[in-house]
Image (cartoon, rainbow, N blue to C red):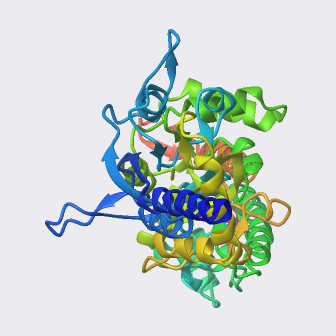
Amino acid sequence: MKLWLLSVLICVIGCSISAKAQDATYKVITIMSEPWVMDKNDGSQSHKGFMIDLLQKVSMVSDFNYTLHYVKDGKYGSETGGRWDGAVGELVAGDADIAALPMIVTEKRQSVVDFSNAVMNIGHRILIKKPVVHNDPLKLLFEPYSLPVWILVVVISWVMGAVLIIINKFSPSEWAQVPVEQDPTFSRDSFAANNAFFFVHSTLTWQGYKQVPKSPAGRIVVCMWFSFIFFMIIAYTANLTALLLANRTNQPVVPFKTFHEMASQTLIPYGTMQNVHLINKMRDSNDPAFHRILAYMDLGDNNFKHTSDAIKKIRDSPKGYAAIVESTAADYIASKNCDLMVVGEKMSPSQVGFACNKAVKGLCNELSEAVRELREDGTMFMLYNKWFTSGQCLQPNLDDFISRQETAKISARPLSLADLSLAFVVLLFGLVVGAILLVVEILVHRYKKKKAGISLEPVRMTAANGRGQSETTDNDENDKAPIAAAEP
């Protein structure tokens, strides 16, 4: 009889415990955060997302029911004056049993609520614009010089042609001054308007030419022009070779691939949201690169308030822009926007898990066991791919890209006016000296001509009858008359 009563009692207790486990219903709170928790927008007021699917899987493994509610103030939870707000505050107050949202596990939060095993390990990565490779051979031919250099070379070519025309016209010793009857090779037309410009543009590409100037002014100008051409062609060839070597990998170039590379440059601006957890992680880090990133973001106005603002900055910034965003958000954005990509290792890694009310004993242990099973059977991996990386855009392999720092030893840039200033100074010196020589040559020629004209002018004498008579009468037959008059 006693044995029968004990068996009945054990059966009743076991059935009641089983019924209690199966009938357990927990109040779960969450926050809307794409793609963790979203509305289905089908009129059913139901939800979808990574956390919703995970909560359903966990409830099936742990065998419990739940009702889903939003956090009243829409916050995750922080302490102010000894009081907690947000999801943590509702758990502490006993208004909820489970918080299913992407809330980072911190020591301060663990002191007031329980956490399950990590649902996901997250961090922060860099979101940038995906580089587009344009194979333009014609562009490569003009790339060794910057645009101001090309413009100045064209202007100087026409100036040189004009200078040679002026020298040919005004220099008394140039080809143009050769008489026609003494010019069987037609050299006197070598530096006329059409031939002068042809001479300049042919010598600019090291082609052949018929004549060079005869005058000192023309020769000094042409010598400096040849020196200018020599320097420019050598510089062009060397830089073109460097550009071809830099492009030999045929890999698209990204501004940087790591946080350290980003911290070592200032060409591409970057920023993040005002994330207290991230800022504290960087401030407490021993890595000087993170300190430089934090100092740069404190000085500039490159931060953003929402990920949509970050996407707009990345696409519209003329210099480019890099957004430091949470790693799962970066993967999700890149999977939906094919012109964006994610680079960089996970900075400030943290864990995300279910938070539980401490008053419900053993609840987070059950959730941890369910999370472990889902991780082992691959369900967690499939859920992540479903919600974070299954967009229409496949994330490219970072090994297919090369950063600017990786190509620093073989990289090249268009040569600027400052790089080629020596060649332009040499040519300017030649033009100044040529102008001085031309003026001196004209003055000397005029002086000689004037002096020769004075010495060759016949001297007139005034006769007694007042009529002018030449002093040079060597060929005057009348002076020889007395000798002829001796004839009978």
Residue 177 against residue 249 in the figure, above or below: above
**Residue 320 vs residue 312, the one in the foreground:** 312
Q: Position of residue 202 (x, y in %)?
A: 63, 80
In which quadrant is the C terminus drawn? Answer: bottom right
Residue 108 against residue 2 in the figure, above or below: above
The quadrant holding residue 141 is bottom right
Q: Position of residue 21 (x, y in %)?
A: 50, 58
Is residue 333 in sight in this rendering?
no
**Residue 29 vs residue 239, the one in the foreground:** 29
| 60 sits to left or right of 426 | left
Q: Position of residue 85 (x, y in %)?
A: 43, 24
Residue 130 against residue 205 in the figure, above or below: above
Is residue 348 in sight in this rendering?
yes
| 466 sits to left or right of 480 | left
Residue 439 against residue 230 in the figure, above or below: above
In which quadrant is the N terminus drawn? Answer: bottom right
Residue at screen point 31% across, 47% down? 69
**Residue 136 vs residue 430, the one in the foreground:** 136
Q: Position of residue 32 (x, y in %)?
A: 35, 50
